[in-house]
Amino acid sequence: MDHKSIFKKCPNCGFEWQVRDSFLIDPNNLLKGYQVNFNSLKQGLFLFDHLLCKTTMAIKAGEFRDLYNGPVFTKRRTGTEKCPGYCSRPQELSKCPNECDCAWARDVADIISHWKKQPV
């Protein structure tokens, strides 16, 4: 049996994106949020609305980690005086100004939010 690999399949309508780039350029996919997983940041979830069938899809943050090539911080700044609390608000997609180990995911959200869309 030939089982082809796909990047993502919409759980509602079944539409398939073979590779990540085709998913990101699809104008019918809109990044709507990020749910942090403080125990494993790569297991956090980016939430996308699939506009064709009006469903929300979750993709692990680790699937997009390679899009970030900035500094990697090792200390967690969550809950400190300078922390803006973005990670506790899933719909907040702003970049984080802190040198926090969670900051890379915020930068990835920004990269995805500004990805150039193309008609399918």
Image (cartoon, grey):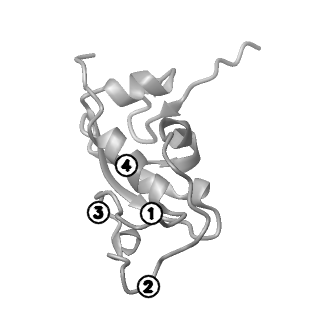
Which numbered disc, 1 or 2, marks the residue closer to the eye? Answer: 2
Amino acid on which the number 2 mark rests in the picture: Thr
Residue 10's place in the image compared with 39, above or below, is above
Q: CA distance from mark 1 to mark 2?
A: 19 Å
Q: Are marks 3 and 2 in contact (CB under 8 Å)?
A: no
Query: Which residue is tagged 2?
Result: 80
Q: CA distance from mark 3 to mark 1?
A: 9 Å
Q: Nearer the viewer's eye, disc 4 or disc 3?
A: 4
Q: Which mark is residue 109?
A: 4
Q: From this view, report whether residue 120 is shown above or below residue 79.
A: above
The residue labelled by disc 3 is: 91
Mark sitting earlier along the chain (2/4): 2
Task: Please provide percent x and percent y for residue 20.
Answer: 48, 27
Disc 4 residue type? Ala
The residues bearing labels 2 and 4 have C-alpha atoms spaced at a distance of: 22 Å
Q: Which tag, 3 or 2, sits closer to the chain's start?
A: 2
CA gap between label 1 and label 4 equals: 11 Å
Q: Amino acid at mark 3?
A: Gln
Q: Regarding mark 1 in the picture, which secondary structure is present there?
A: strand
Specify the quadrant that holds the N terminus. Answer: top right
Image spot of residue 7 (x, y percent): 54, 29
Marks 2 and 4 in Cβ contact (< 8 Å): no
Work out whether mark 1 precedes mark 4 in sequence or the reverse, and give the earlier one. Answer: 1
Left or right? Give the position of 101 relative to 27: right
Residue at the far top in the pictured view: 2
Instruction: Tell me the SS state at disc 4.
Output: helix
Which residue, given by chain and number where applicable, does mark 1 sit on?
A: 35
C-alpha span from label 4 to label 3? 11 Å
Splitting the image into 4 quarters, where does residue 26 fall? top left
